[in-house]
Amino acid sequence: MDPSERRAGVAALFDQLAPGYDRSNVPWFGPIGARLVELTSPRPGDRALDVGAGRGAATFPLVDAVGPTGHVTAVDLSSAMLDQLRTEAETRAVSTLDTRTGEATPDTMPPDTFDVVTASLVLFFDPQPAETLGCWIALLRPGGRLGLSTFGPTDPAWTAAEAVLMAYAPPQVLDARTTGRTGPFATTDSVTALLESAGATDVDSHDEPLDVTFPDAAAWRAWTMTLGMRQFWASVPDPELPAVLTRIESALEPDRGEDGRLHLTQQVRYTTATRP
């Protein structure tokens, strides 16, 4: 499939997800976005770019960090996601933010412009991650800082549950559970190599655990339906769904704690770098 067609497919998926995206009570995108911004170290007065901004998990921490003398641009392929972000910005009375639908490249915005570029849980959706990363680095001014979040491993029970669902994954699908844990995203070393090959320096890539809890497997499924994983559930034939749910329930059971809840752990990979 042509890269432009694959990007259009990603945009369509997130247009569909936008109304309920990150609306659960599970602390997920918010903590990841906030931690990414913290590690990327924006300063008051900086010009910041948030790529794949979604509903603003990293955007609003950037707005807070650069303060009233700074400015943030939020870019996303999904116009529906940006509609949600703008609504939230109006609620917060944010005046130092603008949004753009599309891609962040030197062809769509001026290069050598931004002090900070962040992309939280985004790059593994791109069919050409190395080329796209090079574009983002070109948008930074010399000495500017880049921050990415991707995924490391999940705990064994979570991994086993996802494997049941991933057996139904469409071919060549772009998602954190496929391209996000293989190839250049497989390890901290491979992510470091990816950034260094794109010209970045001072690269640091490390994993930090994020724990989430659910009462049962049905709640886990409901949560995953608000994420990109929704596309995998859509691929499960209706007659097979009860058996799939039973297998996932069994897979997750080792994560049940003494409080009766499932305690799942995801390693989040944070990578920061500098444009020389």
Image (cartoon, rainbow, N blue to C red):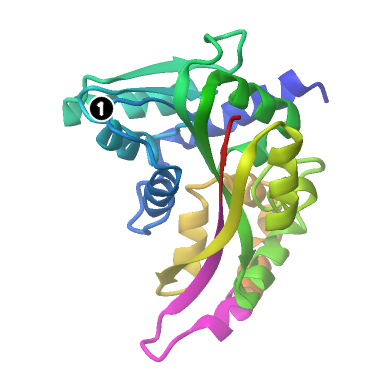
Is 123 on the left-hand or right-hand side of 164?
A: left
Q: Position of residue 203 (x, y in %)?
A: 62, 46
Using the image as rendered, state which of residue 275 and residue 222 is in the foreground: 275
Q: Secondary structure at mark 1?
A: helix
Q: Which residues are magenta?
A: 249-270
Picture quadrant of residue 65:
top left
Magenta span includes 250: yes
Picture quadrant of residue 134:
top right
Q: Position of residue 74 (x, y in %)?
A: 42, 24
Residue at 75 percent across and 51 percent down: it is: 190
Residue at 46 percent across and 77 percent down: it is: 262
Q: Residues within 10 Å of mark 1 (few under 14, many from 20)?
A: many
Magenta span includes 23: no
Q: Position of residue 245 (x, y in %)?
A: 61, 68
Point out the image quarter for the C terminus: top right
Residue at 74 percent across and 26 percent down: it is: 131
Viewer can see residue 127: no
The relative height of residue 200 versus residue 175 in the rendered view (above or below) is: above
Which residue is situated farthest in the bottom direction here? 258
Residue at numbered disc 1: 89
Point out the image quarter for the N terminus: top right
Q: Position of residue 132 (x, y in %)?
A: 68, 26
Viewer can see residue 67: yes
The relative height of residue 88 versus residue 124 in the rendered view (above or below) is: above
Using the image as rendered, state which of residue 125 and residue 166 is in the foreground: 125
